Amino acid sequence: MKILLLNGVNLNMLGKRDPFLYGTETLCQLENKVCAYGKERNVQVVCRHSNSEGELVDILQQTDCDGVVFNAGAYSHYSYALRDCIECIDVPVVEVHLTDVNARESFRRVDVLTDVCMARFMGKGVQSYFDALNCLICATKPTEKQ
Ligand code: DQA
Protein backbone atom coordinates (compact mmCIF):
# COMPACT_ATOMS: atom_id res chain seq x y z
CA MET A 1 0.00 0.00 0.00
CA LYS A 2 1.21 3.48 -0.87
CA ILE A 3 -0.03 6.56 1.00
CA LEU A 4 0.57 10.19 0.10
CA LEU A 5 1.40 12.45 3.05
CA LEU A 6 0.49 15.91 1.81
CA ASN A 7 1.18 19.05 3.83
CA GLY A 8 -0.11 22.42 2.70
CA VAL A 9 0.40 26.07 3.31
CA ASN A 10 2.88 27.16 6.02
CA LEU A 11 3.51 23.62 7.27
CA ASN A 12 7.10 24.03 6.01
CA MET A 13 7.49 26.56 8.86
CA LEU A 14 7.13 23.88 11.54
CA GLY A 15 9.95 24.13 14.05
CA LYS A 16 10.02 27.94 13.76
CA ARG A 17 6.32 28.68 13.80
CA ASP A 18 4.66 29.21 17.21
CA PRO A 19 6.36 26.29 19.01
CA PHE A 20 3.90 26.57 21.90
CA LEU A 21 1.10 25.52 19.53
CA TYR A 22 2.90 23.46 16.94
CA GLY A 23 5.89 22.07 18.86
CA THR A 24 9.54 22.24 17.90
CA GLU A 25 9.66 19.47 15.32
CA THR A 26 10.39 20.44 11.69
CA LEU A 27 8.31 19.24 8.75
CA CYS A 28 11.15 16.94 7.74
CA GLN A 29 11.22 15.34 11.21
CA LEU A 30 7.44 14.92 11.16
CA GLU A 31 7.60 13.33 7.68
CA ASN A 32 10.35 10.94 8.83
CA LYS A 33 8.23 9.84 11.80
CA VAL A 34 5.18 9.18 9.62
CA CYS A 35 7.32 7.27 7.08
CA ALA A 36 8.81 5.12 9.86
CA TYR A 37 5.35 4.51 11.33
CA GLY A 38 4.13 3.44 7.89
CA LYS A 39 7.13 1.19 7.28
CA GLU A 40 6.42 -0.75 10.49
CA ARG A 41 2.97 -1.42 9.03
CA ASN A 42 4.16 -2.33 5.52
CA VAL A 43 2.94 0.96 4.10
CA GLN A 44 5.05 3.13 1.84
CA VAL A 45 4.56 6.82 2.67
CA VAL A 46 5.37 9.37 -0.04
CA CYS A 47 5.79 12.93 1.30
CA ARG A 48 4.91 16.14 -0.54
CA HIS A 49 4.50 19.73 0.55
CA SER A 50 3.30 22.86 -1.21
CA ASN A 51 2.31 26.37 -0.17
CA SER A 52 0.34 26.80 -3.38
CA GLU A 53 -3.35 25.92 -3.59
CA GLY A 54 -3.14 25.10 -7.31
CA GLU A 55 -0.13 22.85 -6.83
CA LEU A 56 -1.93 20.98 -4.04
CA VAL A 57 -4.84 20.43 -6.47
CA ASP A 58 -2.40 19.15 -9.12
CA ILE A 59 -0.72 16.78 -6.64
CA LEU A 60 -4.08 15.38 -5.51
CA GLN A 61 -5.39 14.98 -9.07
CA GLN A 62 -2.23 13.21 -10.20
CA THR A 63 -1.57 10.93 -7.24
CA ASP A 64 -1.18 7.22 -7.86
CA CYS A 65 -1.38 6.47 -4.12
CA ASP A 66 -4.08 4.39 -2.42
CA GLY A 67 -4.98 7.14 0.04
CA VAL A 68 -3.96 10.59 1.23
CA VAL A 69 -3.20 11.99 4.68
CA PHE A 70 -3.74 15.71 4.17
CA ASN A 71 -3.05 18.76 6.33
CA ALA A 72 -4.14 21.67 4.14
CA GLY A 73 -3.24 24.26 6.81
CA ALA A 74 -5.30 27.46 6.55
CA TYR A 75 -6.73 26.38 3.16
CA SER A 76 -8.92 23.97 5.13
CA HIS A 77 -10.99 26.92 6.29
CA TYR A 78 -11.88 28.41 2.90
CA SER A 79 -10.55 26.55 -0.13
CA TYR A 80 -13.50 25.42 -2.25
CA ALA A 81 -10.96 24.52 -4.94
CA LEU A 82 -9.41 21.87 -2.68
CA ARG A 83 -12.84 20.76 -1.52
CA ASP A 84 -14.03 20.22 -5.12
CA CYS A 85 -10.80 18.42 -5.95
CA ILE A 86 -11.11 16.00 -3.00
CA GLU A 87 -14.74 15.41 -3.93
CA CYS A 88 -13.96 14.44 -7.52
CA ILE A 89 -10.87 12.23 -7.10
CA ASP A 90 -11.33 8.51 -6.47
CA VAL A 91 -8.70 8.33 -3.73
CA PRO A 92 -9.78 8.49 -0.05
CA VAL A 93 -8.47 11.56 1.78
CA VAL A 94 -8.15 11.81 5.56
CA GLU A 95 -7.79 15.30 6.97
CA VAL A 96 -5.39 16.09 9.80
CA HIS A 97 -4.49 19.07 11.95
CA LEU A 98 -1.74 19.22 14.53
CA THR A 99 -3.84 21.50 16.73
CA ASP A 100 -7.47 21.37 17.82
CA VAL A 101 -8.89 23.91 15.38
CA ASN A 102 -12.19 24.03 17.30
CA ALA A 103 -10.41 25.32 20.39
CA ARG A 104 -8.76 28.25 18.59
CA GLU A 105 -9.98 31.40 16.76
CA SER A 106 -13.57 31.24 15.47
CA PHE A 107 -12.53 31.36 11.78
CA ARG A 108 -10.76 28.00 12.27
CA ARG A 109 -14.02 26.36 13.31
CA VAL A 110 -15.17 26.58 9.69
CA ASP A 111 -13.66 23.69 7.74
CA VAL A 112 -14.80 23.29 4.15
CA LEU A 113 -12.88 20.04 3.59
CA THR A 114 -14.27 17.91 6.42
CA ASP A 115 -17.41 16.60 4.77
CA VAL A 116 -15.62 15.48 1.60
CA CYS A 117 -12.87 13.72 3.57
CA MET A 118 -13.17 10.19 4.91
CA ALA A 119 -12.31 11.27 8.47
CA ARG A 120 -10.60 14.05 10.40
CA PHE A 121 -8.02 13.73 13.19
CA MET A 122 -6.75 16.74 15.07
CA GLY A 123 -5.29 18.19 18.22
CA LYS A 124 -2.72 15.48 18.96
CA GLY A 125 0.34 16.69 17.04
CA VAL A 126 2.08 13.92 15.09
CA GLN A 127 -0.27 11.37 16.68
CA SER A 128 -3.06 12.88 14.55
CA TYR A 129 -1.06 11.84 11.46
CA PHE A 130 -0.56 8.31 12.84
CA ASP A 131 -4.31 8.05 13.53
CA ALA A 132 -5.07 9.20 9.96
CA LEU A 133 -2.66 6.63 8.53
CA ASN A 134 -4.23 3.86 10.62
CA CYS A 135 -7.68 4.93 9.45
CA LEU A 136 -6.60 4.59 5.80
CA ILE A 137 -4.91 1.23 6.47
CA CYS A 138 -8.14 -0.13 8.03
CA ALA A 139 -10.35 1.33 5.29
CA THR A 140 -8.33 -0.01 2.38
CA LYS A 141 -7.64 -3.48 3.83
CA PRO A 142 -8.96 -6.20 1.50
CA THR A 143 -12.02 -7.85 3.08
CA GLU A 144 -11.24 -11.26 4.53
CA LYS A 145 -13.02 -14.27 3.06
CA GLN A 146 -15.31 -16.05 5.54
C1 DQA B 1 -3.34 23.57 11.10
C2 DQA B 1 -4.48 24.42 11.65
C3 DQA B 1 -4.82 25.55 10.70
O1 DQA B 1 -5.86 26.34 11.25
C4 DQA B 1 -3.63 26.43 10.48
O2 DQA B 1 -3.92 27.46 9.56
C5 DQA B 1 -2.42 25.67 10.07
C6 DQA B 1 -2.12 24.41 10.75
C7 DQA B 1 -2.89 22.49 12.10
O3 DQA B 1 -2.20 21.58 11.69
O4 DQA B 1 -3.20 22.60 13.29
O5 DQA B 1 -1.64 26.11 9.23
O6 DQA B 1 -3.78 22.91 9.93
Image (cartoon, rainbow, N blue to C red):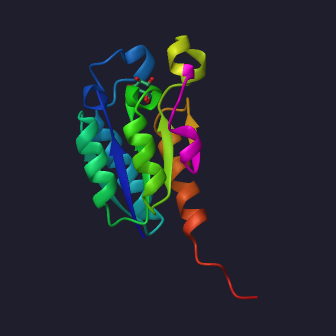
The quadrant of the picture occupied by the N terminus is: bottom left
Q: In this orientation, which residue lies closer to the viewer: 88 or 97?
A: 88
- Residue 49 appears in the picture as rendered: no
Q: In this orientation, which residue lies closer to the viewer: 11 or 127?
A: 11
Q: Note whether 15 is above or below 85 in the view shown.
A: above
Q: Note whether 136 is above or below 73 in the view shown.
A: below
The quadrant of the picture occupied by the C terminus is: bottom right
Q: Note whether 82 is above or below 20 in the view shown.
A: below
The image shows residue 52 at horizontal and vertical percentages of 23, 35
- Residue 92 appears in the picture as rendered: yes
Q: In this orientation, which residue lies closer to the viewer: 80 or 46?
A: 80
The image shows residue 67 at horizontal and vertical percentages of 45, 60
Q: Is residue 111 magenta?
A: yes
The image shows residue 68 at horizontal and vertical percentages of 42, 54
The picture quadrant for ligand 1 comes to top left
Which residue is at the far top? 105
Which residue is at the far right? 146
Quarter location, residue 137 = bottom right
Q: Is residue 139 magenta?
A: no
Instruction: Determine the residue positioned at 32% across, 36% down.
Output: 8
Instruction: Determine the residue positioned at 70% across, 88% down.
Output: 145
Quarter location, residue 17 = top left
Q: Note whether 67 is above or below 47 in the view shown.
A: below
The image shows residue 121 at horizontal and vertical percentages of 57, 39
Q: Which residues are magenta?
A: 109-119
Instruction: Determine the residue positioned at 33% across, 40% down.
Output: 7
Q: So how many labels did they put on this image?
A: 0
